[in-house]
Image: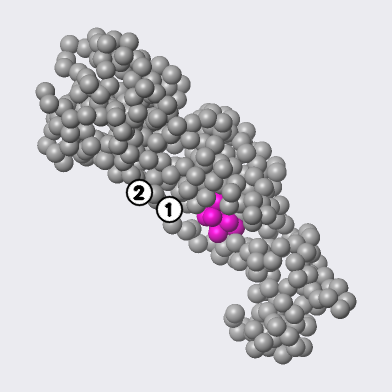
Amino acid sequence: MGTARPKYQQLKNEIEKWIRSGKFQPGEKIPSELELAEQFGFSRQTVRLAISELVHEKWLYKVQGKGTFLTDTLPIKEGLDPQSHLIGVITTYISDYIFPSIIRGIESHLSPEGYSILLLNTDNDLEKEAAALKTVMDKQVDGLIIEPTQSAYPNPNLNLYFTLLEKQIPLVMLHSSYLELSVRSIRSNDRTGGYLAAKHLIDRGHSRLGGIFKADDLQGKYRFKGYLEAIQAHSLPFHPESVQFYTTEQRKQAAAQYVQLIVDSQIQPPTGIVCYNDEIAFDLVKELKQVNLQVPEDISIVSFDNSQLAEAGEVKLTTVHHPKFQMGVKAAECILQDIRQLRAGKKEILEDYVFEPELIIRSSTKPDRR
């Protein structure tokens, strides 16, 4: 604590920081005057004066013979709203693929801390993202965990993000972030993941690689970058005609279009393909079978996410693991850390948390002996 202010004011400010940080829950008893005096080396009179002011300002209340307790509703101070114990969670999707596991991870950490979540999704649509952002502002959430929408493109909703930051609502982003914002993100190392996926095929003798990557988010960009780096590191030729990019709107047709590209092309088809995720790889296995190409006998496939789809089909997918539940837990830990830091009067932007990838090898790849 500083020395410029009177001792009782220093102590009062310190107790306010405790309250803002969530150290005490509403209705919880705080340390006694004697305990506070011993902890900080102040006189009982100094402690009594600090407590008296906090009671007067409705931070605390006293019960005769029992002690001093935190009020159920905190006063507004220094531009900060009282805590709602509500965290906004906005993801591109909610009920399918990897997202239920991420959300369970978030909830598993927030619920024991006394927080509820306001769950919204964008369908990776920028207009829906704008609507979701307005909803979390209306609900006065304490913090927001959000997965960016089409993060590889310029975002038209930056004004809404700036408003959230001006309102001192902490933000944590999942999977990637908007380059225009200085906001903490929780993500996987997609560049390294792309490298591992391509290197796995190269290590098995595949020298002609293809790929299907998503064009409208940064994960796709970084996975493609890692893929290229593996090809270059092993002095293999890059075949752009064997690489396809797709957007969110094109996702359902992406695998079929890629197979059609192989069938119609006069060039030699790839022997190994890196897919943006398990959804694309799962569809690709089925589409290749329609044209009498078998995985892995004719073409080996590596994908991303280690979702339920990786083991759902006849061919079990070799895939780069996604730490779904753990990522949700880490996002929840980080948003609470950011909230407590803000309530303590700090504004430092904490570092990103990056999960390093792990390749899960199954039956969709085999050595190429051609």
Per the image, label 1 sits on a secondary structure element best described as strand
- The amino acid type of the residue labelled 1 equals Tyr
**From the viewer's perspective, is residue 213 above or below residue 135?**
above
Q: Residue furthest right?
A: 64
Mark number, residue 295: none
**From the viewer's perspective, is residue 109 above or below residue 274?**
below
Q: Which residue is mark 2?
A: 356
Quadrant location of the N terminus in the rendered image: bottom right
Task: Characterize the local packing of mark 2: few (<14), some (14-19) or many (20 or more) Cα atoms within 10 angstroms.
Answer: some
- The residue that appears at 35% across and 28% down in the rendered structure is 316
- The amino acid type of the residue labelled 2 equals Glu
Q: Residue 355, how many percent across, how many down?
A: 39, 49
Q: Which residue is mark 1?
A: 353
- The residue that appears at 62% across and 44% down in the rendered structure is 88
Instruction: Find out whether the residues at labels 2 and 1 contact each other: C-beta distance under 8 Å.
Output: no
Q: Nearer the viewer, mark 2 or mark 1?
A: 2
Q: Residue 103, how many percent across, how many down?
A: 56, 41
- The residue that appears at 17% across and 11% down in the rendered structure is 266
Q: Which residues are magenta?
A: 332-339
Left or right of 153? Residue 336 is right
Prevailing secondary structure of the magenta residues: helix
Q: Quadrant of residue 306?
A: top left
Q: Residue 114, how many percent across, how many down?
A: 68, 54
Q: Is residue 83 magenta?
A: no
Q: Is residue 335 magenta?
A: yes
